């Protein structure tokens, strides 16, 4: 085995650039796509100017609620600067939270709380306005409830006296605890689904799985390059058969890929804060062995490099669509459960260690190994 390793190291020394590129390709490509989509989403948020004229608890809470809304990029400006940017179409709309906002809410007055401005090119003014109005209605609703509770307490002489601030604070706590204002939707044959904050949300490990599939298939083109009629007769004069040579080299590639898979774990943990768990490590190891076994099986079935490359890209595209790594396929899985068994990537995305494709490839390799031995004999 040491002789084969030395031979492989000679090959790697001549091809170290391409080898290193394909080993790092899943990590680099995943990080680039994640960062690019995050940048696009941040840049595509609707620019809205907020003018905060008073520094009170209710006004600040309203401002923070608007700022935390997805798809809106809030600019905190004074009124003159905000209107100037609106005229230049640098802002989609401007909302002024007037002085006396908290006092008017406490007096249960809804007039002249907020003034809004828009231009002829304000395409998102209406949904943003309705969203801000909903936040204001929350404040006014709490204030109205506070007065009703106080009146009931005064009328019926309850043992505990509630003031305005206590009722409002209690209603906020109940809203946070019970999640009263969030609604989930579900179909009659499905489970409830909730929307995420981001419009585009790729799974890092799903992207990594797809890019690892592509890089592994292209790394194993050495099997086709070295499986040539001009090379095969040489193995009659050495102690190792050609099939053992290929299997041991595939083992070296697998060990090398596992090392870089560990590098991917650490990189994703420190760069994009993906958690590491024993279940993920086990699923990742199973997926890696399945990938290399599948690439080995596919490569020994081809003699032409270009046909092998074309088939590899076609398989990656097919699995990208049907695995759920890029687009959700929960609806398809619920209606056609057997689809998940046809895709070798799906078990890894579910953190499953058991992969039927790994068993299939193992049986295939063993069958090929035994059949070739009998043929040589």
Image (spheres, rainbow, N blue to C red):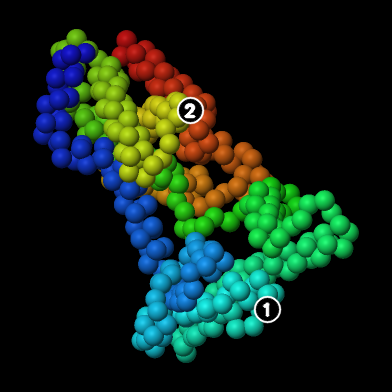
Mark 1: secondary structure:
loop
Q: In the picture provided, is 131 more to the left or to the right than 359?
A: right
Circle 2 packing at 10 Å, graded few (<14), some (14-19), many (20+), is: few
Disc marking residue 317: none
- Asked if one can make out residue 351 in the rendered structure from this viewpoint, the answer is yes
Sequence-first tag of 1 and 2: 1
In the rendered image, the vertical position of residue 344 relative to residue 127, given as above or below: above
In the rendered image, the vertical position of residue 17 relative to residue 124, given as above or below: above
Residue nearest the viewer, comparing 81 with 281: 81
Residue nearest the viewer, comparing 9 with 233: 9
Residue 32, given in percent of the width and then of the height, sits at 31, 52
Q: In the picture provided, is 305 more to the left or to the right than 44?
A: left
Residue 48, given in percent of the width and then of the height, sits at 45, 75
Residue 70, given in percent of the width and then of the height, sits at 50, 63
Q: For mark 1, what is the residue?
A: 109
Residue nearest the viewer, comparing 69 with 30: 69
Residue 191, given in percent of the width and then of the height, sits at 69, 47
Residue nearest the viewer, comparing 263 with 284: 263
- Asked if one can make out residue 129 in the rendered structure from this viewpoint, the answer is no
Q: Which quarter of the rendered picture does the C terminus lie within?
A: top left
Compute the Cα span from label 1 to label 2. 56 Å
Which of labels 1 and 2 is toward the front?
1
Quadrant in the picture for residue 275: top left
Image point (35%, 34%), residue name: 265
Q: In the picture provided, is 167 more to the left or to the right than 206?
A: right
Q: For mark 2, what is the residue?
A: 279
Image point (59%, 71%), residue name: 102
Q: In the picture provided, is 143 more to the left or to the right than 306?
A: right
Mark 2: secondary structure:
helix
Q: Which quarter of the rendered picture does the N terminus lie within?
A: top left
Image point (20%, 37%), residue name: 20
Quadrant in the picture for residue 374: top left
């Amino acid at each position: 085995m040491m002789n084969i390793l030395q031979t492989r190291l000679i090959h790697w020394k001549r091809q170290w650039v391409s080898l290193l590129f394909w080993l790092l390709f899943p990590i680099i490509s995943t990080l680039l796509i994640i960062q690019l989509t995050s940048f696009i989403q941040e840049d595509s948020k609707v620019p809205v100017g907020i003018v905060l004229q008073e520094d009170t608890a209710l006004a600040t809470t309203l401002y923070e609620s608007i700022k935390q809304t997805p798809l809106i990029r809030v600019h905190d400006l004074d009124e003159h600067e905000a209107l100037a940017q609106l005229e230049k179409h640098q802002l989609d709309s401007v909302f002024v939270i007037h002085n006396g906002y908290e006092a008017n809410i406490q007096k249960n007055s809804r007039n002249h709380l907020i003034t809004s401005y828009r231009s002829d090119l304000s395409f998102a003014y209406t949904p943003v306005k309705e969203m801000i109005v909903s936040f204001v209605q929350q404040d006014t609703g709490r204030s109205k409830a506070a007065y009703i509770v106080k009146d009931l307490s005064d009328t019926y002489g309850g043992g505990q006296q509630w003031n305005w601030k206590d009722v409002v604070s209690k209603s906020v706590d109940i809203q946070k605890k019970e999640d009263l204002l969030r609604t989930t939707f579900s179909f009659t044959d499905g489970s409830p689904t909730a929307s995420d904050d981001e419009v585009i949300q790729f799974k890092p490990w799903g992207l990594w799985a797809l890019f690892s599939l592509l890089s592994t298939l292209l790394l194993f083109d050495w099997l086709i390059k070295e499986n040539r009629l001009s090379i095969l007769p040489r193995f009659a004069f050495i102690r190792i058969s050609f099939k053992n040579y290929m299997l041991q080299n595939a083992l070296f590639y697998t060990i090398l890929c596992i090392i870089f898979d560990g590098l991917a774990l650490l990189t994703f943990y420190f760069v994009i804060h993906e958690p590491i768990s024993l279940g993920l490590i086990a699923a990742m190891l199973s997926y890696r062995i399945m990938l290399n076994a599948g690439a080995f099986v596919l490569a020994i079935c081809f003699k032409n490099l270009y046909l092998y490359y074309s088939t590899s890209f076609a398989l990656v595209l097919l699995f990208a669509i049907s695995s759920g790594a890029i687009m959700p396929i929960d609806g398809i899985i619920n209606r056609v459960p057997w689809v998940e068994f046809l895709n070798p990537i799906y078990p890894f995305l579910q953190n499953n260690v058991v992969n039927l494709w790994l068993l299939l490839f193992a049986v295939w390799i063993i069958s090929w190994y035994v059949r070739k031995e009998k043929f040589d004999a």
